[in-house]
Amino acid sequence: KIDQDGSGSISLWEMLEHLQLQRNKFTKRVFSIMDEDNSGEIDFREFVIALWNYCTLGKAALILFAFDLYDNDNSGKIDIDEIKLMLKEVYGKDVSNSQQAQMVMGKIQKFSESKADEEIGKEEFSDFVRRNPALLYPAFQLQMTLQRKT
C-alpha cells in the first residue's frame, strides 16, 4: 500500500505521503536511520525492523533515540546549539510559528545560560525533555502516527 510505484521498496516521499506527514529534516534523519544500506529507500526487511524499533520505544527510549540522532560524534554529549537544531528540525517549517517551539526555545536559552558547560549528557537531556516535552512533541506524534497507520 505504501510502495506506490511498485519498486519493492519505499522512498521517503512514499512513506511521508502515506503517513500524511510533512517532510522536514527530522523525518529525513529518522528515515536515514531506517535506511540501513543508504540506498535512499527502505526495503521490506528495513521497514519491519524500523517500525518495530521506533514504534515500540517507550517515552524514555524515544528521548534517548532523539539524543543519539544528534550526538554526531558519539561522545555521549550534545551542545546547546545541537539542541536548538533538534528543535528546528523536529518542528520543521512550523518552528517560528509554533508557540510550543518558541516556548521551548526560550527554556533552552535559559537552561544554557544557567550552565557553565556548553554540553549536556543523556541524563541531563532526558531530565530537560521530561520537564519540557514540547521539545520532542512532533517526534512523539510521528511515533503515534506510525503506530496508528501500520
Image (cartoon, rainbow, N blue to C red):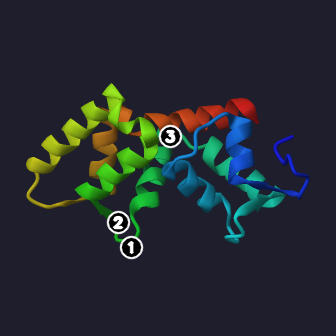
Which kind of residue does numbered mark 1 sit on? Asp
Kindly identify which residue carries mark 1. 73
- Whether residue 127 is visible to the viewer of this picture, yes or no, is yes
* Element class at badge 1: loop
- In the displayed structure image, the side of residue 122 where residue 43 appears, left or right: right
Kindly identify which residue carries mark 3. 139
Which kind of residue does numbered mark 3 sit on? Ala
* Residue furthest top as drawn: 99
Q: Quadrant of residue 100?
A: top left
Q: Residue 76 — which label?
A: 2
CB within 8 Å, label 1 to label 2: no
**Residue at 70% over, 29% down:** 148
**Quadrant of the image containing the C terminus:** top right
- In the displayed structure image, the side of residue 53 where residue 96 appears, left or right: left
For this rendering, which residue is in front, 21 or 70?
21
- Give the percent coordinates (x, y) of residue 69: 46, 59
* Element class at badge 2: loop
* Element class at badge 3: helix
**Residue at 28% over, 33% down:** 102
Disc 3 crowd, CA 10 A, few/some/many (<14, 14-19, 20+): some
Q: Residue 30 — which label?
A: none
